[in-house]
């Protein structure tokens, strides 16, 4: 029985090739979008699941209250690690202190590379269940050891066995390779870690860390834990809640530190906090794109429903004959469902091909490494379910509608679809364009927000500014020589050292005193330490006062503040005012415009620039605009190679690094624009098919109208009007929906654009224009048909 159903369905596909192509093409496009989004969602939901202890690993964090506002941090004081390991050993399987991932120089002889990595305690490889290629999880037990990723090991040693070979970290510490692990996949928090070195080595090779070893007031590390099998995360969080508060000095307990555990399962999807509470994170994009995928697929299903029911009169006699010879309605429903399923299966096969071809391009846009899970049984089970569900959705309305025809009326020739038969189709068209127009408005507003923020004044000159992260003290030791040679070469205007890069936000500190400060007020300033040339190098802009000077000895006790700091302290004339911090009186030398160093979507924070009294972590260089960038970089590299031979010349352009701050929103905008374009294409594809059918159905009417004097323009207007009205109705439904959701989306940004009404006008005009372009071909073709042929054919 079902075999005959599929045979009939196959014949009907070839009988109506044009409609078949529209149906299969539209469904394939919708299903391809749904599959791509499904793969993306699966990748997001499986984030960090590479680690077998995924369900029991957590990051230690704390909330801190400052002047009634609660913030959070994952930068932990060093003594907290041993305290958790000793006092709560019944709750934790492992407690691992770790640096945050950072770039270091890894060298093998003359081969030097800048790679990202972590210093971690010895239990880390076992806790993270690294997939070992060589060695074991105990590779960090020796102090002078290192574990390499497979790709870094190959880069350093080629085809040689790297085990027990010696490499150097940051041109100062020799370590032995004691393990090689497979590269961690991209959907892991640790995928960038090209190496892991022992925590004890980090402490012994960085003497400045000793002052933090017993300090409960300074957060400088991250702490990862693995719970024991019987331990409950929420209960353990309550147990350790007051651990910092109980140990900090009396003056620091006013911050009311509250320690808690943030499980690995929530790092990616629920990684954002506000006022001490988790407010979501990447999960909102999972819901957003999941909803888009469902709606795009629904658009394709609507096309199928519309075209199937629009051609109902052509299959009416078939239904009548089948009912007359004894077919039950259930059998007819089964037949039409089978035909729908056949179309869906063909569309799915085509969609899988589309996904396979477009996946590399999709990965590039989405910043993913998704592969087709051909061997994954769950994937195929979900695909079969997906095909069945799509077939049910697409085929339900046509099957029930077509099987409801009365055999007597059909065979007598008195059957007519009725004046209200087209109403469901019109409703479906309105639904299609409501979704499409909403997506278009959303895409425009996302790009408007990005552009609005990109146009924000940043307070310094990004163009022609590069910086290098310092892993050794060589640059500092030869700073004057390097600076003089570079300036003398004409390739560079200025060079400066600083604690952090110009695009980084740096550390926050309190305890600053100033005239007029309210008693008991807990201040919080963002701080950076800079050499005297920093201002000229980055091009900051003075509102009042002057810059640091090497020639003025007293400037070593001076500071430069930004305008937000002046407002924060409530100073009328800041220049010359004295502030006190860490038992030092510091004179404000000048006030500069706010520099956007953190998120460009947030307001700038109060910042103090202090004199740098130690080797800087970053060297910034202002390239001479009169020299070509390539020529200047070649000159800079040669000078660095001569005086700083131990460090690779790995530089970053400040404008490129600043642009990366927009990467998430740009990625969302690109994906949204692609899905919006596909949605409108699918909708127009269905509209084209409906216009073709309507023109064909009204052939006789068009012929008669032409005979009585109707022009091509009149006929084009008559055939296009109904579709334009439907699209305009869609726009009026979509506009308030889009405004509501997009306005809520914008509220997450402190620095945000306003939704302009011209966006809605342009979208409506664009939707109407696209509709006219879609239906005009069929309308004009029908209007220009010779009426003699039209009436003779009837």
Image (spheres, rainbow, N blue to C red):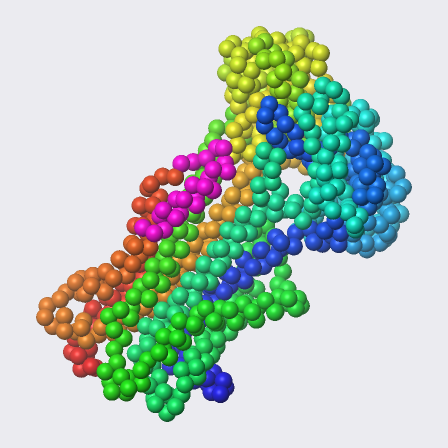
- Residue 661, image x, y percentages: 56, 38
Q: Quarter-wise, where is residue 429 in the image? A: bottom left
The answer to whether residue 330 of the structure is visible from this angle is: yes
Does any portion of residue 633 appear in the rendered image? no
Q: Quadrant of residue 493?
A: top right
Count the numbered circles shown: 0
At x 39%, y 58%, the residue is 680
Compared with 392, 278 (above or below) is above
Q: Is residue 743 magenta?
A: yes
Residue at 85% over, 37% down? 86
Q: Quadrant of residue 41?
A: bottom right
Residue positioned 18% across, 82% down in the render: 792
Query: Is 69 left or right of 262, judged from the image as shown?
Result: left
Residue 77 in percent (x, y) is at 75, 30
* Secondary structure mostly seen in the magenta stretch: helix
Q: Nearer the viewer, residue 744 or 539?
A: 744
Q: Is residue 643 magenta?
A: no
Tell me what residue is drawn at x 70 percent, y 11 percent: 584
Nearer to me, 155 or 715? 715
Quadrant of the rendering where the C terminus is positioned: bottom left
Q: Residue furthest left?
A: 708
Extent of the magenta region = 732-754
> Which residue is more in the foreground, 445 or 53?
53
Residue 489 in picture, x, y percent from top left: 63, 25
The residue nearer to you, when weighing 92 against 619, is 92
> Could you tell me residue 544's position as x and y percent?
51, 13
Residue 373 sits above or below residue 564 on the image = below
């Amino acid at each position: 029985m079902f075999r005959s159903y599929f045979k009939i369905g196959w014949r009907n596909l070839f009988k109506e090739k044009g409609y078949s192509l529209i149906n299969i093409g539209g469904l394939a496009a919708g299903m391809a979008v749904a599959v791509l989004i499904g793969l993306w969602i699966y990748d997001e939901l499986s984030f960090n699941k590479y680690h077998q202890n995924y369900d029991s690993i957590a990051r230690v964090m704390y909330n801190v209250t400052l002047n009634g506002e609660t913030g959070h941090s994952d930068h932990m004081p060093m003594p907290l690690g041993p305290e958790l390991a000793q006092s709560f050993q019944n709750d934790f399987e492992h407690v691992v202190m770790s640096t945050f991932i950072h770039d270091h120089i890894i060298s093998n002889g003359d081969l030097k590379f800048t790679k990202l990595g972590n210093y971690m305690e010895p239990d880390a490889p076992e806790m993270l269940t690294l997939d070992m290629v060589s060695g074991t999880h105990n590779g960090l037990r020796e102090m002078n050891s290192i574990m390499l990723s497979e790709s870094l090991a190959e880069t350093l040693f080629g085809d040689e066995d790297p085990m027990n070979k010696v490499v150097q970290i940051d041109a100062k510490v020799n370590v032995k390779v004691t393990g090689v692990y497979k590269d961690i996949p991209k959907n892991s928090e640790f995928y960038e870690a090209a190496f892991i070195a022992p925590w004890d080595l980090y402490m012994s090779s960085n003497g400045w860390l000793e002052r933090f070893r017993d300090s409960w007031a300074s957060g400088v590390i991250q702490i990862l834990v693995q719970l024991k099998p019987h331990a409950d995360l929420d209960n353990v969080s309550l147990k350790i809640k007051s651990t910092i508060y109980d140990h900090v000095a009396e003056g620091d307990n006013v911050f009311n530190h509250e320690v808690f555990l943030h499980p690995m399962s929530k790092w990616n999807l629920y990684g954002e906090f506000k006022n001490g509470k988790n407010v979501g994170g990447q999960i909102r994009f999972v819901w957003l794109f999941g909803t888009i995928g469902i709606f795009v697929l629904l658009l394709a299903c609507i096309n199928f429903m519309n075209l199937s029911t629009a051609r109902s009169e052509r299959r009416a006699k078939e239904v009548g004959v089948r009912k007359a010879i004894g077919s039950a309605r259930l059998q007819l429903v089964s037949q039409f469902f089978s035909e729908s399923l056949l179309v869906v299966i063909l569309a799915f096969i085509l969609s899988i091909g589309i996904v396979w071809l477009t996946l590399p391009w999709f990965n590039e846009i989405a910043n993913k490494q998704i592969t087709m899970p051909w061997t994954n049984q769950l994937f195929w089970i979900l695909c079969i379910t997906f095909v069945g569900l799509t077939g049910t959705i697409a085929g339900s309305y046509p099957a029930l509608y077509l099987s409801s025809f009365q055999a007597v009326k059909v065979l007598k020739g008195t059957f007519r679809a009725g004046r209200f038969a087209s109403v469901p189709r019109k409703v479906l068209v309105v639904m299609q364009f409501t979704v499409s127009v909403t997506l278009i408005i959303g895409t425009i507003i996302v790009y408007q927000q990005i552009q609005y923020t990109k146009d924000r004044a940043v307070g310094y000159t990004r163009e022609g500014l590069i910086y290098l992260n310092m892993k050794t003290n060589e640059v500092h030791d030869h700073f004057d020589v390097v600076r003089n040679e570079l300036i003398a070469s004409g390739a560079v205007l200025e060079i400066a050292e600083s604690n952090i890069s110009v695009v980084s936000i740096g550390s926050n500190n309190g305890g600053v005193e100033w005239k007029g400060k309210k008693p008991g007020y807990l201040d919080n300033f963002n701080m950076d330490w800079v050499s005297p040339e920093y201002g000229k190098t980055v091009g900051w802009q003075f509102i009042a006062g002057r810059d640091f000077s090497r020639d003025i000895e007293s400037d070593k006790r001076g500071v430069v503040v930004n305008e937000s700091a002046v407002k924060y302290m409530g100073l009328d004339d800041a220049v010359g005012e004295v502030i006190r911090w860490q038992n030092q009186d510091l004179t404000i030398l000048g006030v500069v415009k706010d520099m956007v160093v953190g998120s460009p979507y947030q307001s700038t924070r109060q910042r103090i620039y202090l004199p740098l009294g130690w080797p800087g972590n970053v060297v910034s260089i202002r390239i001479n605009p009169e020299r070509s960038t390539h020529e200047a970089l070649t000159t800079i590299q040669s000078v660095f190679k001569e005086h700083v031979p131990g460090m690779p010349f790995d530089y970053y352009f400040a404008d490129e690094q600043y642009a990366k701050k927009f990467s998430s929103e740009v990625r969302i905008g690109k994906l949204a624009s692609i899905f919006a374009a596909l949605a409108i294409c699918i909708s127009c594809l269905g509209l084209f098919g409906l216009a073709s059918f309507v023109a064909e159905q009204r052939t006789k009417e068009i012929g008669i109208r032409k005979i009585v004097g109707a022009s091509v323009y009149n006929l084009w207007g008559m055939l296009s009007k109904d579709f334009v009205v439907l699209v305009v109705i869609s726009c009026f439904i979509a506009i308030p929906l889009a405004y509501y959701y997009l306005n809520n989306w914008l509220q997450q940004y402190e620095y945000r654009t306003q939704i302009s009404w011209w966006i809605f006008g342009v979208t409506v005009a664009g939707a109407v224009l696209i509709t006219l372009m879609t239906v005009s071909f069929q309308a004009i073709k029908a209007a220009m048909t010779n009426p003699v042929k039209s009436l003779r054919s009837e």
